[in-house]
Image (cartoon, rainbow, N blue to C red):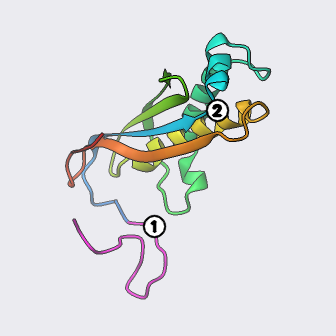
Amino acid sequence: MSDKLTHFDAEGRAVMVDVGAKPITDRSATARVRVVMLPATLAMIRAGSAKKGDVLGVARLAGIMAAKRTAELIPLCHPLPITAVAVELEAAGEDSVAIAATVRTTGQTGVEMEALTAASVAALTVYDMCKAVDRGMRIEGLRVVAKSGGKSGDFKQE
C-alpha cells in the first residue's frame, strides 16, 4: 500500500489525478451496504404495500442513475464511460435490505467510487421511501468488497 495521497500536488493543493498515461483495461468494482429497519418495515417492502410504490425497484433505478453521475458529485472523480451497472437489493433476515452495486468500465481508472455511489444512493432511496413508517432505520457497512483491473490488481473482501 502506498502512503502517498494521489489527489494532492507537492504544495498540498487538491488536484485531479492525470490518468492519461495509464493503460486502458477492463475494470470493475462491487460495493455493499445494508439498510437495517423494523421487521414490519421489511414486511411492507416485501408485500409491495409502501405508499410511495415499489421500494426495491425505485432504489435499483436510483442506484444505476447515481453511478452514472458520480463525477458530478465527487469533485475529483473522472467522468467514465461506464459499460454496465447492476444494483441488487434483497431482504436479509427479517430486519434489513442488503444492497450490492457492481460497476464496469473499460478505461484508465477504476470504478470504486461509482460502485460506492450507486450503493449509497440505493440505500438512501430505501430510507426515503420508508421513513414515514420507520424513522429509526440505519444505513450500515458501506464498503468496497471487490475490484479488478488496473495496476494495483484485484482486491476482494466480504
Residue 6 in magenta stretch:
yes
Question: Which percent across, then down, holds residue 152?
Answer: 21, 54
Taking the spot 80% from the left edge, 20% from the top edge, the residue there is 51
Taking the spot 54% from the left edge, 30% from the top edge, the residue there is 96
Residue 103 is left or right of residue 34, and the answer is left
Q: Nearer the viewer, residue 81 or 104?
A: 104
Instruction: Tell me the kind of residue under disc 1.
Output: Met
Query: From where the camera sits, is residue 72 visible?
Result: yes
**Mark 2 to mark 1 CA distance (whole Å):** 32 Å
Q: What is the secondary structure assignment of the residue under circle 2? A: helix
Can you tell which mark lies on residue 126?
2
Taking the spot 27% from the left edge, 73% from the top edge, the residue there is 3
Can you tell which mark lies on residue 16?
1
Read off the magenta span.
1-17
Query: From where the camera sits, is residue 111 visible?
Result: no
Q: Quadrant of the N terminus?
A: bottom left
Label 2 crowd bin: few (<14), some (14–19), many (20+), radius 10 Å:
many
Residue mark closest to the camera, 2 vs 1: 2
Q: Quadrant of the C terminus?
A: top left
Q: What is the secondary structure assignment of the residue under circle 1? A: loop
Q: Nearer the viewer, residue 111 or 2?
A: 2
Can you tell which mark lies on residue 63?
none
Question: Which percent across, then down, holds residue 10?
Answer: 37, 85
Q: Is residue 128 above or below residue 142?
A: above
Residue 98 is left or right of residue 57, and the answer is left
Residue 158 in magenta stretch:
no
Instruction: Tell me the kind of residue under disc 2.
Output: Val
Q: Nearer the viewer, residue 75 or 91?
A: 91
Taking the spot 65% from the left edge, 19% from the top edge, the residue there is 45
